[in-house]
Image: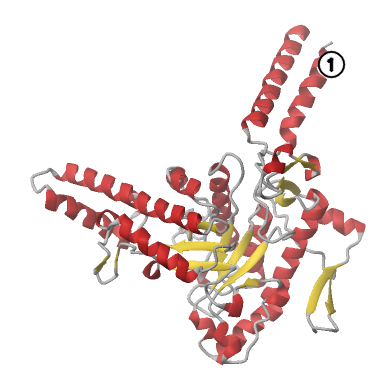
Amino acid sequence: MCKLMRWLAMMMLCVLVDTQNFKPTKAPMFQNKPFIVFWNAPTSQCKNRHHVDLNLDTFGIAANSDEALNGDKVTIFYHNVFGYYPHISDSGESFHGGVPQNQSLSNHLSQVQKDINRVLPSKDFQGLAIIDWENWRPQWIRNWDNKVIYREHSINLVRSRHPSWPDSKVKTVAQKEFEKAGKNFMNSTLHLGLKMRSQGLWGYYLYPECYNYNYKNHPHKYTGKCPNIEISRNNQLLWLWKASTALFPSIYLPEILKSSTNVLKFVHHRVREAIRVATVARQDYVLPVFVYSRPFYSYSLIALSQMDLVHTIGESAALGAAGMVMWGNKQYEASRDNCLTVQKYINETLGPYIINVTLATQFCSQELCQKKGRCVRKLPESSTYLHMPSGSIKTKVSKKSSKLTFFFKMTKKEKQDLKKGFVCQYYLGWSGKFCKKQDASSSHLKSGFLAQGWSSPRISQTLLLNWILAEILLTLCYFMIN
């Protein structure tokens, strides 16, 4: 009898373990592309003026038409061209009231509507829409260093209205006014964007932040971990995560970190924190995470080393990110020499590595998930990567278009080795081992991949019941033996 109870208990616990605690995630933007690399740099002049083709399409890098900064694939809204974003310049000049509580939200949203129609004229826009507001942060405590001016400005506004109030009261009210207005500005802007271009993926650049920049002070003791207080502060931004439909953390690398072990620590914990936030943002699915990176070290045209590519693009893919956004500025297209530098790096290093990782993510999705999910490391801290075996990638040139295409050939052992260390995180609407089972509730939704996942109340209650019954059976078994 006791053996039977133990067996039943273990079966119930196995059901719990089989879920891997993974909520489903949204299906990728492009079919059968679980990991997508976007190009978010203005490089149209390389081809149009300098006659240098960057060959982005050859390597499967998603770029806007004419390689413009903004377009149908990815659009970034900077603070000076999107609504009436209140901010203070480095010289101390206030724009649009300086702080959010000193600007009309309705006027701002009216201008945002015009700007969206101007930048994204198609109502069928299905790309990434990133709002880049970095001048102030919505949490009072996080406005430190050169951002302290936003606290001071807020305090002065309250003091001008209530000169007789004690400093403590002035500061308390100033903080409340600033945080309330900041939240309204960020939330309302997102909501309007989603209302107008509902098929786009909207979020803020650099959110969530990890603040693990202490590699400069103690490089030999650096762990890369996000400070606990910052994780707690990210939890307080749940309102922002709920309003977002994608997250856009940043892993820009300064040259000081080049090819050091601290790159992996820096990137790993920033991406892990973004995925943690993406998991708690919604009950039904995990928000897609698109990691902002650069092909070069910050403020330079010094290309990332092969090691650092693995620890940025490779690490992000292995942890379950939906893709990367490779950002760049006008320096890339400023001269023919600069364009040739970018082209050489893409052709010889960056492009081949992107092909390697994207093919590996597609293969793993096909093998482990039947193309209905994304492969994620079983153990986040492990050193397993989604890499194709050496020599497995082949090329073919089309006779009609002369276009180069990539495909792979692997032995059975190579296929088995690639899948080791990974599990399937299924897309919304698919479940079961190897993601073969389509949830019945998905049939009435617009996308075939949209449905309730394991975190729905019904399934969550089932898992909880299994756990409780397993505990009861094991306890009864213990008393029977003793």
Among the 4 quarters of the image, the one containing residue 55: bottom right
Residue 73, image x and y in percent?
Answer: 59, 68
Among the 4 quarters of the image, the one containing residue 306: bottom right
The answer to whether residue 13 is left or right of residue 130 is: right
Q: Which residue is drawn at 42% across and 43% down?
A: 236
Whether residue 288 is visible here, answered yes or no, is yes
Q: Which residue is drawn at 83% across and 52% down?
A: 367
Q: Which residue is drawn at 75% across and 36% down?
A: 18
Mark 1 belongs to which amino acid?
Answer: Leu
Among the 4 quarters of the image, the one containing residue 251: bottom right
Scheme by which the image is coloured: secondary structure
Whether residue 303 is visible here, answered yes or no, is no
Q: Which residue is drawn at 65% across and 53% down?
A: 319
Residue 341, image x and y in percent?
Answer: 60, 85
**Quadrant in the picture for the N terminus:** top right
Of residues 92 and 427, which is closer to you in this image? 427
The answer to whether residue 178 is left or right of residue 3 is: left
Of residues 381 and 38, which is closer to you in this image? 38
Binning the other alpha carbons within 10 Å of mark 1 as few (below 14), some (14 to 19) or many (20 upward) gives few
SS for dot 1: helix
- What residue is pinned by disc 1? 4
Does 125 sit above or below residue 91?
A: above
